[in-house]
Amino acid sequence: MTRSTAIVTGAARGIGLATTKLFLEEGRRVVMIDRDEAALAEAANGLTNITPILCDVSDPEQVAVMVPAALDALGHVDALVNNAGVADFGPIEQTDFERWRTVMATNLDGVFLVSQSLTPALKQAKGAIVNIASISGLRASTLRVAYGTSKAGVIALTEQQAAELGEYGIRANCICPGPVRTKLAMAVHTKEIIDAYHDAIPLNRYGTEREIAEAIVFLCSDKASYITGQTLAVDGGFESTGVGLPALRG
Ligand SMILES: NC(=O)c1ccc[n+]([C@@H]2O[C@H](COP(=O)([O-])OP(=O)(O)OC[C@H]3O[C@@H](n4cnc5c(N)ncnc54)[C@H](O)[C@@H]3O)[C@@H](O)[C@H]2O)c1
């Protein structure tokens, strides 16, 4: 089967833009969704076979307008990558309800809303969903009460989607990136956090946007045709090492 289309949310920069470019290299046409108008215009500039659509995925009304526009541009939807996300690190006592809701609105509500609205089209094309969670959704740590919980929710939501939509030929999988030097990460990663990650990650480095995109595009492809309901950490080995005491490395 030729897979020729994809929708990527949060496509204006970082992992979403890298994923868009990899889909384009594969020959797919891509709808790029983002709420940052200037960044979306800049990212789209010079790319061909793309349709940028301005949309805040946390807003049901905007999603309702975006979906027919995306279907109009693509005709059918072979892949949906729910990548749009926000990060906000803070102690539990300082994470007021507004901060909590802001994180949940994009990271969890957005994945639910966009997937639900595109389910009829995904059924028709027997398309694939890839949701972007985080290693913070797999392993708890300080300062991530909202972010980590939202990403654990994304992992659970992916399993719900896989369980319910499999009979329609829709696959749903989840990627948990380790740290990548994007605008999102650099806003919340202090020098201490960067050094600690280097120590705790067996590959001793941050990942690149392209390395995350490769796994996303694989899970969207028919090479992954019997894989659904899975969570794949693309994290340099962080998740597999448990506590991973650097002092025990020798
Ligand atoms: N960078 C990392 O270290 C890292 C690690 C683990 C997981 N992730 C996840 O990867 C995904 C991509 O992150 P990134 O690092 O590329 O971030 P980024 O900030 O570089 O890009 C995110 C994009 O999403 C857009 N966006 C945010 N909220 C939106 C909304 N409500 N509607 C539409 N667009 C919205 C932003 O405008 C931006 O263009 C996120 O879900 C993030 O949580 C990133």
Image (tube, grey):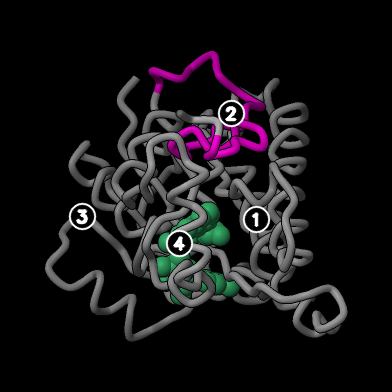
On the image, the x and y values in percent for residue 180 come to 40, 56
226 within the magenta span: yes
Q: Magenta stretch?
A: 222-247
C-alpha gap between disc 4 and disc 1: 28 Å
Quadrant in which residue 214 is drawn: top left
On the image, the x and y values in percent for residue 225 come to 48, 17
Which secondary structure, mark 1? helix
C-alpha gap between disc 3 and disc 2: 38 Å
C-alpha gap between disc 1 and disc 2: 26 Å
Residue at image position (66%, 33%) is 242
* Labels 3 and 1: the sequence-earlier one: 3
- Mark whose residue sits in front, 1 or 2: 2
Which secondary structure, mark 4? helix
On the image, the x and y values in percent for residue 104 come to 74, 67
Q: Which residue is mark 2?
A: 240
- What amino acid type should be assigned to the residue bearing mark 2? Ser
Q: Residues within 10 Å of mark 1 (few under 14, many from 20)?
A: many
Q: Are marks 3 and 1 in contact (CB under 8 Å)?
A: no
129 within the magenta span: no
* Labels 2 and 4: the sequence-earlier one: 4
Q: Residues within 10 Å of mark 4 (few under 14, many from 20)?
A: some
* Labels 1 and 2: the sequence-earlier one: 1
| Residue 126 disc label | none
Residue at image position (55%, 31%) is 248
Residue at image position (64%, 44%) is 119
Q: Which residue is mark 1?
A: 111
C-alpha gap between disc 3 and disc 1: 24 Å
Quadrant in which residue 146 is drawn: bottom right
Q: 83 and 176: which one is in front?
A: 176
